[in-house]
């Protein structure tokens, strides 16, 4: 059923799309984009377009409410721009709404905004996918595939040429021969398969904020790579002094404490690759996030060796993102840079804070590996 | 559209209920406009709500945004709109298709409360468009007016182009809250009065001191003194030429009168200003209006309408409507409780000098003069007050304690919202502050020819809270697009006087 508001609604969506384009930077850093539904669609809470007005600065305000509690008792955390003052009344306070953007669109936007090059395939893909594409017409077929316009055209043509078309009473009656149906072709498409291995340092020094940064960044990397490859797989490894493989949920939520042996994660990654992903068929992406505080120089050496011997020959690229944390020494990134100077398959990036995420994604994916 | 128009008339059984409820409302003394009920499916309800009740308004993406929000939250079952009622004569109210009968009855009773309020509260008189010649009833054909506004804007859209008109609407909406909330007491804001005071052509005489002997003239009124007098007069004249003479809070109206606007811009600005004034009374009486409607639906339903089997469902719905929260004020709850509080006090005679001066707790607790003036009082209150005066006059210490009212604020140290106080004075003060000017900063237009450069000067009357600066600068940009010359606003930033200025290219802050 068509509504009067449809036009305004469409206009709003257009603007939001446009704004996603322009302000993508801001949204990424705010961590407002999350969650997948089904295979294709993510539903993303984006900020409402707020028409600027003269109004009071937030948080100086506060307000009046009703309920229990004595002075000093908490009424909930402050988060970002949530506004507590403002109008008394219900219906206010909902500052996010959901906009459905398909993952494809999102990845394209990301690509455009960050000027990411399309990824060069390793070119060894052997797995083929069969796809049907509707591209032609034929004269027989099921009614559900009838091409109305072309059928009409054929009937009109016939009636004109037979001379029984009356412009005053423009009635077109299609007969059997006029019927046109959509038809499809079967195409075989080679598929490049890819696996992303995320490794994260969950030692005591990685705080919630650091993990949040990793989460946002890996969501976007995931989105981009999924756009480039059909059938992408993701694996997650967390480590402190020992490494283990976990599911996505655990990956982002765990908080461990303890020392840091980065080599343990690299060894596990090498094992996973060896067992599951023959390197001639898979594009392999390795991402490692840490605050750069490794246990010992020996362990760092071990890491370098594992990388050189096992991981780098197998992977398209190895990306190391170092999240700045108040505790870590941040030494590891310097070591990596020293050992792999000039090696294009090792990309390092420092992520200072949320605003640094965009630049870091650019660092990682900007080479089209 | 007409071809696809829905059948929105009420089904028979609800028509009967409506007649009954209308009669009960009249018996209770409610005085309402004729009220038309229509029933809408949920998506149309969302649409109507997105347009603020007027489905034929001017096109703008903001309505699409509101719709998106409403549609999403109703699809996911987060919230439902039960009712919508429009301040129009005759009033129009929408019911949601598929609600239970008791819900529909509740909504109808609630609607009659609102319509009585629209008709009788003084703040809504600004929405009168004249008086009916026959019976003196106010004319409020706002559904027509809004449709006309829509037609005007659509016409310009066709002529000028969507980009330009839409951008200009956005700019105007940034200024939408710059209207004069006391318009009800001032003038009819919907008529653009252009009265020029006739200019006195005879040159003014320079005042002299009285001289009884003519030869004394040059001693008593020497040339130097006369010069000073002349200068003073000129100064006064030039001061009078300052426009506006008095600071004006109707910034929108001022721009309409003095801004260098093209015809289409003038139309758009006028439309948005008029609609802002139409909606203003509803902002100013949110607590009173919802409280009044809630008071009456609860009396009508529980005393006259509900059947035994319906009472649980009714109570459940009511509990939802009246739920309180420490972080947000519920106007339904506050309003209805305050009316009941007033009714109780006036029934028992708990007012006036004796009551105020009595500090014997036992006596106060048992104070009952059996005056029975409560009903009359609340009807009087619903006519003569708005939210600010309502709270200011009737909020009492007992009430604040009974209702567990509190103030809260943001504690930067703990990064969280915290209860600040339960003291009567603080609760009242904060509440009044929130309600004053509907929670907007007070801003006046001060000078249209600031420093003789044709620049516009606004002044923010600072009451302890700074303006949100990035927003303020964005508004200045919009203002510049209307005024087309540099614009500035005088305010305070962190306790210091500051001037925010925008000249079309750059922002500047002078302290």
Image (spheres, grey):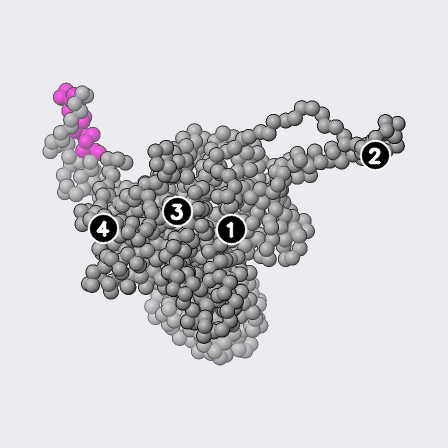
* Tag in front: 1 or 2: 2
Is residue A208 in sight in this rendering? no
Marks 1/3: CA–CA distance = 21 Å
The residue at which mark 4 appears reads as B20
Residue indicated by mark 1 = B437
* Among the 4 quarters of the image, the one containing residue A285: bottom left
- Count residues near mark 3 (Cα–Cα under 10 Å), then give few for <14, some for 14-19, many for 20+: many
Same chain for the residues under marks 1 and 2 in the image:
yes
Question: Which image quadrant: the C terminus of chain A?
Answer: bottom left
Q: What is the crowding at mark 1: few (fewer than 14 residues within 10 Å), some, or many (at least 20)?
A: many
Mark 2 residue crowding within 10 angstroms, few (<14) / some (14–19) / many (20+): some
Considering the numbered disc 4 on the image, is that residue within a helix, a strand or a loop?
Answer: helix
Between residues B437 and A222, which one lies in front from this camera angle?
B437
Are the residues tagged 4 and 1 within 8 Å (C-beta)? Answer: no
How far apart are labels 1 and 2 at the CA level? Answer: 48 Å
Q: Chain of mark 1?
A: B
Q: Position of residue A205 (x, y in %)?
A: 52, 74
Residue at 42% x, 76% y is: A243
Q: Is residue B231 visible in the rendered structure shown here?
A: yes
| Residue found at x 45% / y 52% | B385
Horizontal side of residue B338 vs B101, given as left or right? right
The image shows residue B31 at horizontal and vertical percentages of 33, 47
Of marks 4 and 2, which one's residue comes earlier in the chain?
4
Give the Cα distance between marks 4 and 1.
39 Å
B490 vs B35, nearest the viewer:
B35
* Disc 3/disc 2 C-alpha distance (Å): 60 Å
Mark 1 and mark 3 in contact? Answer it, CB < 8 Å. no
Label for residue B120?
Answer: 3
Magenta residues (range): A149-166
- The residue that label 2 is drawn on is B225
Secondary structure under badge 1?
helix
């Amino acid at each position: 059923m068509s509504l009067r508001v449809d036009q305004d609604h469409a206009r709003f969506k257009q603007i939001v799309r446009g704004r996603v384009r322009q302000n993508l930077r801001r949204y990424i850093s705010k961590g407002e984009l999350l969650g997948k539904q089904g295979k294709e669609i993510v539903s993303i809470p984006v900020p409402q377009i707020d028409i600027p007005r003269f109004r009071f600065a937030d948080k100086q305000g506060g307000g009046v409410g009703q309920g229990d509690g004595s002075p000093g008792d908490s009424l909930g955390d402050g988060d970002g721009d949530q506004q507590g003052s403002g109008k008394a009344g219900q219906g206010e306070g909902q500052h996010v709404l959901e906009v459905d953007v398909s993952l494809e669109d999102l990845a394209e936007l990301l690509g455009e905004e960050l000027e990411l090059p399309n990824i060069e395939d390793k070119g060894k893909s052997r797995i083929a996918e069969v796809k049907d594409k509707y591209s032609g017409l034929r004269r027989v077929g099921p009614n559900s595939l009838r091409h109305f316009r072309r059928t009409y055209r054929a009937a009109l043509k016939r009636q004109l040429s037979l001379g029984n078309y009356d412009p005053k009473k423009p009635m077109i009656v299609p007969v059997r021969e006029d019927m046109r149906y959509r038809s499809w072709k079967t195409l075989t498409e080679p598929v490049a398969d890819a696996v992303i291995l995320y490794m994260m340092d969950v030692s005591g020094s990685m705080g919630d904020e650091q993990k949040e940064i990793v989460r946002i960044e890996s969501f976007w990397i995931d989105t981009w790579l999924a756009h480039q490859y059909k059938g992408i797989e993701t694996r997650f490894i967390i480590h402190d002094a020992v490494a283990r493989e976990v599911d996505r949920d655990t990956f982002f939520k765990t908080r461990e404490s303890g020392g840091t042996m980065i080599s343990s994660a690299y060894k596990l990654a090498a094992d996973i690759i060896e067992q599951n992903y023959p390197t001639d068929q898979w594009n392999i992406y390795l991402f490692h996030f840490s605050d750069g505080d490794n246990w010992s120089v020996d362990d760092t050496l071990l890491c370098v060796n594992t990388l050189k011997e096992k991981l780098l020959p197998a992977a398209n690229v190895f990306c190391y993102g170092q999240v700045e944390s108040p505790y870590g020494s941040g030494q590891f990134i310097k070591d990596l840079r020293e050992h792999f100077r000039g090696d294009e398959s090792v990309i390092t990036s420092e992520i200072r804070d949320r605003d640094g995420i965009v630049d870091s994604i650019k660092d990682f994916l900007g080479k089209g590996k | 559209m007409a071809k696809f128009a829905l059948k929105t008339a009420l089904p028979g059984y609800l028509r009967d209920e409506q007649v009954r409820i209308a009669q009960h409302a009249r018996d209770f003394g409610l005085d309402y406009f004729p009220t038309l009920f229509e029933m809408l499916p949920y998506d149309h309800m969302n649409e109507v709500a997105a347009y603020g009740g007027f489905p034929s308004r001017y096109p703008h993406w903001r309505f699409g945004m509101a719709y998106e929000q409403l549609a999403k939250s109703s699809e996911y079952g987060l919230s439902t709109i039960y009712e919508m009622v429009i301040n129009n004569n005759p009033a129009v109210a929408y019911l949601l298709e598929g609600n239970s009968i008791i819900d529909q009855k509740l909504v109808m009773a609630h609607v009659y409360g609102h319509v009585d309020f629209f008709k009788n509260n003084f703040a809504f008189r600004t929405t009168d468009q004249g008086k009916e010649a026959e019976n003196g009833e106010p004319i409020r054909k706002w559904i027509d007016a809004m449709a006309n506004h829509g037609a005007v804007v659509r016409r310009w859209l066709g002529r000028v182009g969507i980009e330009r008109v839409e951008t200009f609407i956005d700019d105007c909406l940034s200024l939408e809250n710059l209207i004069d909330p006391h318009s009800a007491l001032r003038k009819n804001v919907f008529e653009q009065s252009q009265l020029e005071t006739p200019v006195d052509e005879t040159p003014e005489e320079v005042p002299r001191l009285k001289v009884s002997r003519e030869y004394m003239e040059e001693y008593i009124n020497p040339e130097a003194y006369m010069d000073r007098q002349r200068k003073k007069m000129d100064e006064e004249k030039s001061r009078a030429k300052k426009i506006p003479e008095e600071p004006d809070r109707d910034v929108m109206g001022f721009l309409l009168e003095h801004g260098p606007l093209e015809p289409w811009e003038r139309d758009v600005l006028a439309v948005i200003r008029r609609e802002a004034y139409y909606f203003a009374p509803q902002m100013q009486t949110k607590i009173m209006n919802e409280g009044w409607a809630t008071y009456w639906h609860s009396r009508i339903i529980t005393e006259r309408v509900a059947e035994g089997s319906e009472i649980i469902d009714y109570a459940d719905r009511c509990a939802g409507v009246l739920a309180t929260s420490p972080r947000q004020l519920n106007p339904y709850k506050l309003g209805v409780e305050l009316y009941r509080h007033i009714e109780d006090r006036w029934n028992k005679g708990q007012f006036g000098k004796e009551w105020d001066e009595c500090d014997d707790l036992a006596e106060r607790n048992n104070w009952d003069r059996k005056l029975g003036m409560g009903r009359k009082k609340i009807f009087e209150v619903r006519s003569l007050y708005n939210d600010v005066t309502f709270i200011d006059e009737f909020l009492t210490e007992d009430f604040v304690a009974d209702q567990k009212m509190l103030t809260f604020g943001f504690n930067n140290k703990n990064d969280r919202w915290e209860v600040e106080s339960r003291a009567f004075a603080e609760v009242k003060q904060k509440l009044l502050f929130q309600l004053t000017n509907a929670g907007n900063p007070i801003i006046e237009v001060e000078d249209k020819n600031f420093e003789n450069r044709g620049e516009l000067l606004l002044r923010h009357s600072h009451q302890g809270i700074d303006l949100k600066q990035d927003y303020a600068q964005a508004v200045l940009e919009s203002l510049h697009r209307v005024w087309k010359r540099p614009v500035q606003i005088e305010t305070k930033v962190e306790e210091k006087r500051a001037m925010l200025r925008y000249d079309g290219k750059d922002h500047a802050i002078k302290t």
